[in-house]
Amino acid sequence: MITTSRKHRDVYIDNLKPKTEEQSTLIGFVKQTGNQKYHINDPKQKEATDALIQFIAGDLLQFATVESQSFRNFVEKLDPKFNLPSRKHLSSKLIHTKDKEVRQLLHDNLKKAGHICLTVDLWSNRSMKGFLGITAHYVLNWEMKSAMIACKRFKGRHTAENILHEYEECITSFDINDKIFCEISDNASNMVKAFNFSVPGYTEPDDQNSLNEDNLDGDFEQGTIEIENPFPQHKRCYAHSLQLVIKDAFEECGQGIQKMQFFLYREKKMSVAVW
């Protein structure tokens, strides 16, 4: 009983003693505030996050880059206050938000353009998965602009009907149907057929002089009426056509080229042996 009373007495006395708090120094305060991260709405945090998204998306890097310890150390050295987003936050929110901003900006620029020319290409990767790419070319403020408006997975057979369906779905999403005046593609038969627009039951006259003069207004002279094609023009890629010409030429003189390559290889080998 005496031991217990003495113990409580010691505790009581300790509580009565005034507690002295250490005054924080200026250096300690700077160190404490310097380790604090930026707020999510801080302009520097937003600017750095936007640069990070441009870095990941622009170079087609994996989202797991932000989880690399070496990368995190690098960012820490650049700016200790920057709050590096997680992989989940980057892939589920930040990238999608940036995608909406870019698409809206591209949509506004395409609406301002007077005319738009499109290049369309369809290819397969090593896994034989098809992809469709569409690039828009236009002039805005007297400056030539090019922007990829589609690079999407192409499922199903590469028929002209499927190509045309995916193409129309893309240009409809940007609402530029009435601005396109030319499409350029390679010489593949499915591409040529896909953009061979025509109106059922309508045949364009071969010669303007074949029009019946009796149906012409007196105010118009013969040969001055022009029939405007309501559909965009389809052009074949000049570079691809030139490549096919060169390929055919190589096939015609393939044996001669092989002999020339063998001759050059032998001469080079002999010159190395002499030196």
Image: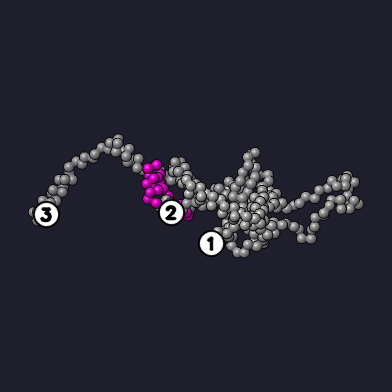
Q: Is residue 116 left or right of residue 275?
A: right
- Residue at 28% x, 36% y: name it: 25
Amino acid at the residue labelled 3: Thr
Query: Which-is-in-front pick, marks 1 and 2?
Result: 1
According to the picture, the residue beneath numbered tag 3 turns out to be 4
Q: Residue furthest left?
A: 2
- First in sequence: mark 3 vs mark 2: 3
Amino acid at the residue labelled 2: Ala
Residue 72 image position (x, y, % from top left): 39, 48
- Residue contact at pointers 1 and 2, CB within 8 angstroms: no
Tell me if residue 23 comes above or below residue 147 in the rendering: above
Tag 2's secondary structure? helix
According to the picture, the residue beneath numbered tag 2 turns out to be 64
* Nearest to the observer: residue 96 or residue 16: 96
Label 3: how many residues lie within 10 Å, few (<14), some (14-19) or many (20+)?
few
Q: Does 41 lie within the magenta span? A: no
